[in-house]
Structure formats: C-alpha cells, structure tokens
Amino acid sequence: MKNYEIIRRKNARQLLKKVSLVACLGFAGFSLPFSHGQKVSRLKITSAQQVKTAHKTFTPVKASEMELKNIREALTFTRSTSSKSLPKIKQAAKTSRVIYPIEVTSPANNDVWEAGREYIIKWEYGGSDDVRIDLQSASAGKPKAQYPIVSQAPNTGTYRFRVPYNWIIDPYGYVVNIQTLESKQSRSSQGTITVYTQPVDLECSIVDTKLKRQTTSYVFYVERKRWLEFNVLMRNKGVQSPVTIQNVLVRLIKQPEGVVVAQEEWGFSGIYHHDWYKLSEPIKFNISNIEAMVYPPFRDEDINFEAGNYRLEVELDPQNSLRENPECRYDNKDVHLWLIK
C-alpha cells in the first residue's frame, strides 16, 4: 500500500510538469441579477493565454448623484476667485491715454462647450483696439496650456466661435482669456468651463459595492463563503452619443503567483455622452470554490485561493475599435486590489 502511494504521487508530479494548467472560474455574478446563494461552477484552463473567455452583454444604468459624490469630488477643479465687480478705469503711467479694463461676461462658470457647436464670447470695456482671444487651462496642479481661438478680432464685445473637433485632450477646467493687442489689458472669464472636443474618450473606474473610489479593499472573513464584490463605472467624455462598447476585457488574477482565475469579455450599449454608467447590480464573485492545477507545479500550500491578494483589471475597448485618440486612452483601464485575511 505504501509503495502504491509513492508511485501514485510520482505519476501525479510528472503529469503536472507536462501539462500547463491555471485556475479559471467564470464570474457567477455577471448574469444579473445575482442570487447570494448561487453556486459558482468550477472550470479549468490550460494557460493564461488559453483562458476560456465568457461573453456577456449588459445595458448599464445611469449612476445617481448620490453614488457619484466621490467622483465629483475627485473631478472638482479650483475655480477663479477674481472679483465680479468691474475694475476702475485707470490712467496709464506717463501718458494721457486712458486704459479701459476688460470684463468677460460669457462664458459663465460651469458652462459646457461641445465640438461642432457655436458659442458667443462676450466682454465689456477694453477700449477700441483689437483683441486676442484664447482658451486657457485653469485647473490647480496641472500645467498651464493655451489654445488660440482668434489672434486678432475687432473689439466689438462679442465673438462667435465654433468649437473644433479633436481640439483638446482633457475637457475639464478652462477659462476664456481676452487681451487687447495695443494696451495689453487682459481678463479671463469667471470660474471654469468644460470643453468636450473628442468624439470618443472613454473612462473606466472599478468601485466597491458602496461606490467609493479606492485602490485596495481589505476584506476580513469569519465564515466559509468568501465573496469579492464590485461594480464598474464607465463614461464617454467625448461628443459621440450614444456609444456601444463591444469589448470590455475583465481579468481576475491571483497574486503574487499571477494565476488568471477568471476572464470575461463584456459588451455595453446605450452610453450617452458625459454621464457615468454602472452595472445594474454589483458583481459578486465567490472565491471559496476555486480549485486549480498550475504550471510550474506548486505544492498545495503554495497557492491559497481563499486568502492573500487578488488583482482585478477592467479595460474598455482594448482593441480600440472605436478609434479613440491614443492620447485619451490613459484612463480606459482600471485596476483594483483585494487583500483578503
């Protein structure tokens, strides 16, 4: 009996060296709605490159204002604190020429500009010499950038401007600055505006079940069933609307071994511009049923699928089938970590 057990273990080790197997478990919660007591099927895959990918299609729902509180705070920009009262007319030094200060009255704080549409820029005073008009970034902690609107225009107090496509990358935190060419008087619009010029500019964020943005979740379990729960927020900061995202790549990886335990491809439709959308129900992933064979061979105690670290990766449109500007794709992918104890 003892010799039989030694031979059986030896054959098992040889089999592990010939076959490259990693763990795979489909996201049970991806078929919504999800029942907390629902069983999770056990799957096995040959390698991380040969993961059996499940395809799911969802119709996401618009996230509520309460759910987006933390996101709004993350996207809050420092507003201009210049006075709303008109500055006094002053005399230029050593000359008799009167300098007329400018007051920009439009755009107003929190206005939104979109590519392809025309907007009227308005200002008061400034004398009679021609003006230069620019769009300038005004967000705290970001490099200052300037985008010319017109290099020279009559000082009539109004200027019509059609916003071009693909003009700027980051849409948030801008002011309109007007400067007289001769007297060099300059003033910017009050507050900041948002300027959307990219047709498609996707953004993704993994959040916990309470819709709070965080990098790592610390999970402590006191019972056998162990669940990783999350939701995904997504939006299009471009002007194309609606947008259908045909491929959202989702991978769950056990760390530090790098074992892929789940891989999914989702599809989303009905993403209208600028609004955040989320899954109608959070994903609930049961990790207590994972079993796997991996290569190179590990001893059973080398990989503990019920504790340690998990890394979740979600990437919108990884093949860029929507032809998004490559400079805008830095926020298409988000990563969330769980530390389970």
Image: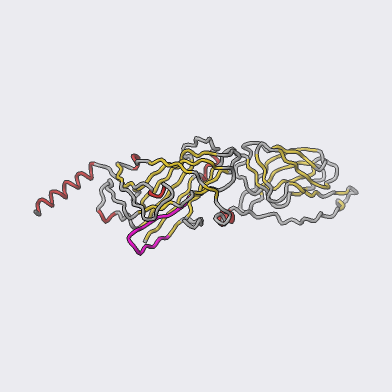
Image location of residue 251, percent across then percent down: 40, 46
Image location of residue 304, percent across then percent down: 31, 56
Q: Is residue 330 magenta?
A: no
In the image, 8 versus 167, the foreground residue is: 8
Which contiguous range is marked in magenta? 218-231
Image location of residue 267, percent across then percent down: 46, 40
Q: Residue at x 49, y 56 (%)?
A: 214
- Quadrant for residue 160, please give it: top right
Q: In the rendered view of the protein, which quadrant contains the C terminus?
A: bottom left
- Quadrant for residue 224, please give it: bottom left
Residue 225 vs 103, above or below: the answer is below
Left/right placement of residue 175 relative to residue 306 reads right
The answer to whether residue 260 of the structure is visible from this angle is no
The answer to whether residue 139 of the structure is visible from this angle is yes
Q: Residue at x 71, y 42 (%)?
A: 134
Left/right placement of residue 275 relative to residue 130 reads left
Residue 244 vs 220, above or below: the answer is above
Image location of residue 137, percent across then percent down: 66, 47
In the image, 282 versus 335, the foreground residue is: 282
Left/right placement of residue 263 relative to residue 301 reads right
